[in-house]
Amino acid sequence: MSRAYNFSAGPATLPESVLRHAQGEMLEWHGSGASIVELSHRGPEFMEVARQAEADLRMLMAIPDSHAVLFLQGGATLQQALIALNFAAPGQAVDFVISGHWGKTAIRQATPYVDARIAASSEAGGFRDVPARAGWTLSADAAYVHYTANETIHGVEFRDIPDVGDVPLVSDFSSSIASEPLDVSRFGVIYGGAQKNLGPVGVSVVIVRRDLLERAGQPRADIMNYASHVRGDSMLNTPPTWNWYLAGLVFQWMLAEGGVDEFARRNARKSALLYDLIDGSGGFYRNEVAVGARSRMNVPFFLHDDALNAAFLAEAREAGLIGLKGHKVLGGMRASIYNAMPVAGVEALAAFMRDFQQRNG
């Protein structure tokens, strides 16, 4: 077996050591006589897995006791609707800052339930930058302010936490969570699908300030009530146990590797390798994002001639580099270099890109 370097935006690459660990425990978990995916989610075996996963994530991200941690189904897009239902009154104003495709998705999911207002948007400039904080128009009566910390498709990232005063700050961190230290206390809600930086597809992490759970929100079924999920330890219904278990292994791996401080260093190095190569290619490759807003997680780039795209992707695959085709919204190429992507993988991509340019420039 020969594993490729997988630059897919999600489901994304997982640490090989984690996959091998899970492989070794797949048939029987710790002498239980069954796989962890076969054991009851309310049994002592899985309850311990769940407890340890939360404890490790809290340690990894320095999550304070003021915030609850949920492991839920449905992905980030479902959370965008649930956040509106749980934390805004019917028709109440909610401010959205739009910096790319997923910011537009977030406002679309909330629109049926709230007075969704665009506080700022960089769409007119093609989502090549984040909207400057000085230009935001915020509502005094907003239930919360929502922004997307890292836009997976357009490759723009907020490098600082925006100050929005006393209004709760809500953010989609799907593609940058646990990639560097973060002051969780400054957020009302942090949420994201695990399938980029934290684990496999099929489980989402929601970190919510406990006082927000006291809000009445809007009429909703109990299964859509965050407070009920907190009371039920994320087991209000049968959770995706295998996905939760695997995410827990990723948390343990990250802690053993040095935690978010170490991954911040690696991610800075990996992204610099690619951006320096692109910027130094004389126009053969280009990235159109403003330098100060460039994502460390997702690096979109274009070849100077689209006619070379098919050859680039085919030859990259032959070289063991997969998942580089850009999203259909933007086109071109995209290298997603999340926590589990080793520096060696980015070095291999950079070497391939230099060679491809020499042969086709």
Image: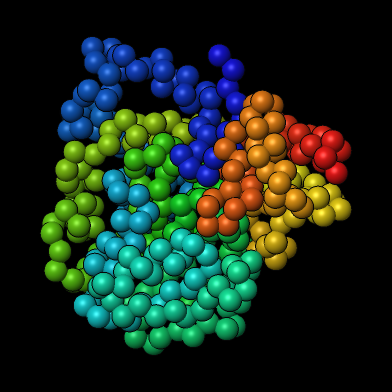
Q: Nearer the viewer, residue 159 or 187?
A: 159
Q: Residue 178, percent across and down? A: 52, 48
- Residue depicted at 57% across the width and 83% down the height: 135
Q: Residue 358, percent across and down? A: 86, 38
- Residue depicted at 64% across the width and 50% down the height: 332
- Report the quarter where the C terminus lies: top right
Taking 39 as reference, is 53 left or right?
A: right
Q: Nearer the viewer, residue 35 or 202?
A: 202
Count of residue discs: 0
Taking 133 as reference, is 25 left or right?
A: left
* Residue lying at the far bottom of the rendered structure: 140
Q: Residue 296, percent across and down? A: 64, 51
Q: Nearer the viewer, residue 167 or 183?
A: 167
Taking 32 as reference, is 173 left or right?
A: right
Q: Residue 238, percent across and down? A: 19, 38
Instruction: Give the answer, above or below, for where 111 lies relative to 47.
Output: below
Which quadrant of the figure has residue 68? bottom left
Instruction: Give the answer, above or below, for where 330 lies relative to 186.
Output: above
* Residue lying at the far front of the rendered structure: 307
Q: Is residue 86 visible?
A: yes
Q: Is residue 260 visible?
A: no
Q: How is the image coloured?
A: rainbow
- Report the quarter where the N terminus lies: top right
- Residue depicted at 31% across the width and 17% down the height: 29
Instruction: Give the answer, above or below, for where 332 lies relative to 318.
Output: below
- Residue depicted at 24% across the width and 39% down the height: 239
